[in-house]
Image: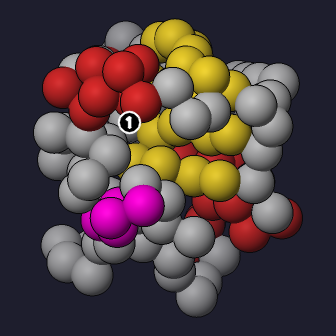
Amino acid sequence: MNRIWKFLSLLLLLAGTMACSREGMEVGAQAATVTYTVSDTCWTYLSLETGRVVGTALLGDEQAEAEWRQRTDWDIALCGDLLRTNSGTSGNGGGGCLVLDEAFENVLTAPEDGYLLDTENGEIW
């Protein structure tokens, strides 16, 4: 679970930095810290573009999950220690994730390949 939180923090920090640069701030400016509460019984869908919760769905609600698969306004979803990206069997978006073996501050550009897509059961891990 610690690995998921580190990954989420990295994604949120990256999204916050990109949002700051769009508003005319210098790229690399300090991004605001965002805190979310994640349930063990409910998927929380997040947009990295806006830094906000887009919505939720009860774990195991097949109809709600089918509806979320069609949407492209979310990037990642969390439920306890489970993680989904809007990719593969979890969504129609062009998402995915990549675990890097280097510190965030050393990553200057996003890698072009090697991203993992969600699997048949809808989770990466």
The magenta span reads 117-121
Q: In the image, is 78 to the left or to the right of 85? A: right
Count of numbered labels shown in the rendering: 1
Relative to residue 41, is residue 121 depicted above or below?
below
Residue at 41 percent across and 30 percent down: it is 62
Report x, y in % for residue 49: 38, 24
Residue at 57 percent across and 70 percent down: it is 125
Q: Main secondary structure of the magenta part?
A: loop
In magenta stretch: residue 61? no
Q: In terms of depth relative to the viewer, which is nearer, 6 or 116?
A: 116
Residue at 42 percent across and 61 percent down: it is 121
Whether residue 26 is visible to the viewer of this picture, yes or no, is no
The secondary structure type at the circle numbered 1 is loop
Relative to residue 44, is residue 78 depicted above or below?
below
Report x, y in % for residue 3: 74, 68
Relative to residue 25, is residue 124 depicted above or below?
below
Report x, y in % for residue 39: 80, 29
Q: In terms of depth relative to the viewer, which is nearer, 108 or 43?
A: 43
Q: In the image, is 20 to the left or to the right of 103? A: left
Q: In the image, is 59 to the left or to the right of 96? A: right
Relative to residue 116, is residue 55 depicted above or below?
above
Report x, y in % for residue 38: 78, 30
Disc 1: which residue: 75
